[in-house]
Image (cartoon, grey):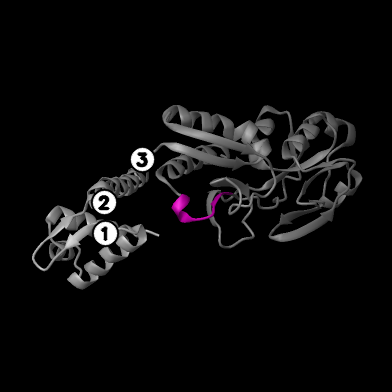
């Protein structure tokens, strides 16, 4: 395989008319430069430069090959320049995975705002609550609840203080009443969320730092957080949702918070990526906007 450094030796030798001058330019010994040139000729199976003790000149094959060698080096340098330029600018394609409920009902309008401010950005959105394999999927960045189990991933906080809130529709509460304590949930139809074949059916509540864990039951569960929210809005049961997912419903009175004297489970929101190199100016600008909007939204 042709080595780039050998191409550079060949080009500089042709430009300077001297292998010694090419070696000096590259901070190599003349012997090392000669080895590189011979290696290139060996790869190509032809002599590129005719050398004597007093002079050297391009062979016909060398003259033909020189333009191709220049093109290769120019393209490599142009690619490096483009990457460096891209790392300093906001733009390009961002593939983003977001939770279904939060993505549809909260994040979507902020993503619209971000794109309106930066029209040169192309967003590729994947909605879903499954855990994305950041190393095998085409997704560059994911917004996810909780802390990734894979400690090698980069997880930057967006809403570190977010927690779950127990809620139900006014209609459901009118028909079934409010639980006075976590244990009362055994008498309620609890709408459960399932993820990776595990159903979240042990709900934890905190009072003065002490946890109370209740195993809940119900006639509905789903791996789609948006569907669980819709069931709650329709009065089908009690949901234990991230406050971010239902803040708008609570404010509008479509859902009511219950057991408010207890603190819900933590549900921190993070921006997750496989490597810090993924944190381009575009991703950092998006993170800044989301941090600002989320902080105001949870007040």
What residue is pinned by disc 1? Answer: 47
Which residue extends farthest left?
54
Question: Does the rendering let one see residue 29?
Answer: no
The answer to whether 235 is drawn above or below residue 145 in the figure is above
Rendered location of residue 228, percent (x, y): 77, 38
- How many numbered circles are shown? 3
Q: CA distance from mark 1 to mark 3?
A: 45 Å
Residue at x 30% of width, y 61% of height: 41
Q: CA distance from mark 2 to mark 3?
A: 43 Å
Rendered location of residue 214, percent (x, y): 83, 55
Residue at x 62% of width, y 38% of height: 126
What residue is pinned by disc 3? Answer: 89
Rendered location of residue 273, percent (x, y): 53, 51
Q: Which mark is residue 167?
A: none
Q: CA distance from mark 2 to mark 1?
A: 7 Å
Question: Residue 71's quadrant in the figure?
Answer: top left
Give the number of the mark in front: 1 or 3.
Answer: 1
Magenta-drawn segment: 270-278
Question: Does the rendering let one see residue 55?
Answer: yes
Rendered location of residue 246, percent (x, y): 68, 36
The answer to whether 5 is drawn above or below residue 230 in the figure is below
């Amino acid at each position: 395989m042709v080595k780039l450094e050998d191409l550079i030796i060949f080009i500089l030798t042709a430009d300077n008319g001297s292998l010694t001058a090419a070696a000096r330019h590259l901070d190599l010994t003349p012997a090392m430069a000669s080895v590189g040139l011979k290696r290139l000729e060996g790869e190509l199976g032809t002599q590129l430069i005719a050398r004597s003790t007093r002079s050297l000149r391009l062979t016909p094959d060398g003259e033909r090959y020189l333009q191709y060698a220049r093109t290769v080096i120019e393209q490599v340098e142009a690619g490096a320049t483009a990457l460096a330029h891209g790392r300093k600018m906001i733009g390009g394609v961002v593939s983003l995975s977001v939770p279904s409920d939060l993505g549809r009902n909260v994040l979507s309008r902020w993503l619209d705002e971000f794109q309106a401010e930066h029209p040169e950005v192309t967003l590729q959105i994947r909605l879903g609550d499954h855990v994305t394999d950041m190393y095998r999927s085409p997704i560059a960045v994911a917004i996810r609840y909780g802390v990734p189990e894979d400690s090698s991933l980069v997880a930057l906080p967006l809403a570190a203080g977010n927690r779950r809130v127990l809620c139900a529709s006014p209609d459901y509460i009118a028909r079934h009443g409010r639980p006075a304590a976590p244990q009362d949930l055994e008498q309620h139809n609890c709408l459960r969320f399932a993820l990776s074949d595990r159903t979240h059916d042990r709900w934890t509540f905190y009072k003065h730092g002490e946890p109370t864990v209740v195993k809940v039951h119900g006639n509905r569960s789903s791996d789609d957080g948006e569907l669980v929210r819709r069931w709650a809005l329709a009065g089908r049961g009690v949901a234990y949702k991230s406050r971010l997912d239902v803040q708008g419903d609570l404010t509008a009175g479509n859902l009511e918070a219950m057991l408010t004297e207890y603190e819900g489970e933590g549900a921190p929101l993070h921006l997750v990526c496989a490597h810090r190199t993924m944190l381009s100016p575009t991703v950092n600008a998006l993170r800044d906007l989301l941090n600002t909007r989320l902080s105001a939204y949870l007040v």
